[in-house]
Image (cartoon, grey):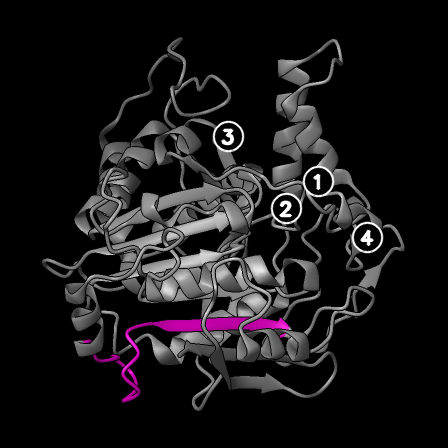
Amino acid sequence: MFKFNFDLDDLEDVDPLGAPGQAVNEPQVSSTLESSASSVESKHFTEHRLSDLIAKLPPEISYSPLTIVSAHGDKTEITISRRDLFDARFQLIASSSSDNPAGADTTSLTDLEYVEAPSDLVPGVYEGGLKTWECSIDLAATLHNMLPPMITKSQRILEIGCGTAVPSVYILHRLFSSPPVQGRRTAIHLQDYNELVFRLVTLPNIILVWYMSPASESFRTSLEAKFDSKPPSAPSDEPSAVSEADEADEPDTFPPADPTESGDLPLPPALLTAFQKSLVEYGIDLRFFSGSWETFDLSACSHSGDDSDEGGDCRYNVVITSETIYQTDSLPALLDLMWRACTNHGRDEGQEQSLEEVTREKLKIDWDTAEGNSYLCLVAAKQVYFGVGGGVAEFVHAIETGVPSTHKRHKGQVKPVWAMNEGVKRSVMRVTWQ
């Protein structure tokens, strides 16, 4: 097992975080990691519908502020809200108790064991997605300087190994902070090994960034008007279709839309409906995929959205990932997925691009460089992951040589975008493929 000095018994999300550049503790690795990793089987690719994840949300979530400092120049500070990990733990405890009072083995109890485990990673079981890792903040800080040229354009974004999804949440913060753009479509696809991560932290964080933004203003205004004119009402016996517990009635108070403060956000049906309406209004398509990297089915994520369209364009404009290169054994699958997501290559063994596809790709111009790439691929990582063998050197070597690969991956180049050379060394890198 893999441990990063993380203790849930403190009842706080105590990850060693701060502004990019703040030193953090080095990871600790137990001797059982390599033997565990060698016997791990691939986990099947599965899509989880937004409506299904919403149906599993609790009646209320607790949150705290997280500050992102621009990685360049002006050092602008952006504060977002993220769900407290202790709150997710309490949700699992409550669901385990209510679903299985007799104490028999259930999926919820297994999930609770992940959260209470004295390790941050159990290979093939839990890949650390419940915790906010410092490099995800580095990546969000880097995106702050790279987003302006593309924020008004339609985009397809894939975050690999998303976990708490801080980079994607930051992108949503930028989208929700401005009025909707007519005709703009933004697909944000989130991948993680565990479905548990989506319902406990990823989706709650996305709802929080919406609620704290101008995009929720009409909902919040309607609530204020409703509470001003609403007489006391008797509790309702109707169960909520979107929470794990029956709700007596709409909550009487909601927190201010201030991400710099901690608080509790009720999740009544009206709020969740308003959230989904905002996604439509802003042209945002959220999709969630779990499973191993080598099983990720890009054809299911094509532009057309039609799984039967095997020739569909599966490329993403933006591919981002953080803290995912810690283990050398998993690098080939990760890099193959990154390459396929950026270039649309490797769709099927032996399948060649059509002349039309090649021409379209050659004519595309990158929106922030003159290099001719139609994608932005960013990787944030620590320089070395002690005891596991992974790190930046191994990552760069695999990119530049193109091996090993099960998809005949092209060689690529890695350019540093941001680096922290004090304390635990970290960097954000841009990858381009030949």
Q: Earlier in the sequence, mark 1 or mark 3?
A: 3
For marks 1 and 3, give the CA distance.
Answer: 17 Å
Secondary structure state at the residue bearing disc 1? helix
What type is the residue that disc 1 sits on?
Answer: Val
Q: Viewer-nearest of labels 3 and 4?
A: 4
Secondary structure state at the residue bearing disc 4? helix
For marks 2 and 3, give the CA distance.
Answer: 14 Å
| Numbered range of the magenta stretch | 364-381
Q: In this view, does 343 lie to the left or right of 26?
A: left
Label 3 sits on residue: 58
Label 2 sits on residue: 85
What type is the residue that disc 3 sits on?
Answer: Pro
Q: Is residue 126 left or right of residue 151?
A: right
Label 1 sits on residue: 115
Tell whether label 2 touches label 1 (CB within 8 Å). Answer: yes
Label 4 sits on residue: 33
Residue 385 occupies quadrant: bottom right
- Residue 157 at x, y percent in the picture: 35, 60
Q: How crowded is mark 3: few (under 14 residues within 10 Å), some or many (20 or more)?
A: many
Nearer to the camera, 394 or 287: 394
